[in-house]
Amino acid sequence: MRPQLRRGIAPSGLMLFLGALWVGALAQTAAPTPDIYTCIDAKGRKLTSDRKIPECTDREQKVLNPSGTLKNRVGPALTAQEREQLEAKNRALQKESLRQEEEKKRNRALLARYPNADAHQKERLEALGQISLVKLAAVKRVSDLQAERAKLLEEMAFYAKDTSRAPANLRQHLETVTQALEVQTRFMADKDQEMARTNARFEEELLRLQPLWRMNAANSAQ
């Protein structure tokens, strides 16, 4: 007699069934366990959820591990004013960070241009010397104009009682020389101010460079 097969799941179907169970078990094992959010709302109720709790947006929420231990804390949602203050603070921090970066770039450029005090002093003297040369030329021009004006005033003295009788070209010449003298006087005053500004700039640079030079010297000595 031929042996009778037991009715039920065929061998191939059984393998598929067991494989599906194994995949499902793996999926359950690999699935992350959700965090637990808990808080005490405004009415004093203790609320628990697997996501942030809307009733507690105005207060702190605790995030717990599945074991019940504390994992994290979530702060209350910011008001519009608080968000604006936070954004202003972040902008100020960003601005300060950019300022510091620009200052570092400027320091590097200064060090590259003036590696030591001698180089800085040399350029200062050269800059002041150029201004002085221009001013000396103006001083000489002023001296010449003053001498010329003095002669014209001597000629005008003949017409002291009635200056309208003085020749037109004499009056015009005196006016031209007087205006030129005023221009040169203002020019010399401008050169004095330029010299003061140049000195102030080099003094400001010197204050910035001195600690940088000391730092470089200390690094070189190490």
Image (cartoon, grey):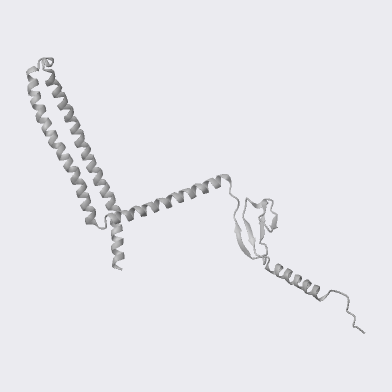
- Residue 203, percent from left and from top: 26, 49
- Residue closest to the far bottom: 1
Q: Image quadrant for the N terminus?
A: bottom right
- Residue 107, percent from left and from top: 33, 54
Q: Is residue 123 visible?
A: yes
User: 154 and 214: which one is in front?
Assistant: 154
- Residue 6, percent from left and from top: 88, 78
Q: Is residue 41 visible?
A: no
Q: Residue at x 18, y 27 (%)?
A: 179
Q: Is residue 17 above or below residue 199?
A: below
Q: Image quadrant for the C terminus?
A: bottom left
Q: Residue at x 9, y 24 (%)?
A: 152
Q: Is residue 124 above or below residue 173?
A: below
User: 92 and 103: which one is in front?
Assistant: 103
- Residue closest to the far front: 1
| Among the 4 quarters of the image, the one containing residue 110 | bottom left
User: 14 and 60: which one is in front?
Assistant: 14
217 lies left or right of 169: right
- Residue 173, percent from left and from top: 13, 24
Q: Is residue 77 above or below residue 181?
A: below
User: 4 and 149: which one is in front?
Assistant: 4
Q: Residue at x 66, y 58 (%)?
A: 37
Q: Is residue 63 above or below residue 15?
A: above
162 lies left or right of 193: left
Q: Residue at x 29, y 56 (%)?
A: 112
| Among the 4 quarters of the image, the one containing residue 221 | bottom left
| Among the 4 quarters of the image, the one containing residue 38 | bottom right
155 lies left or right of 48: left
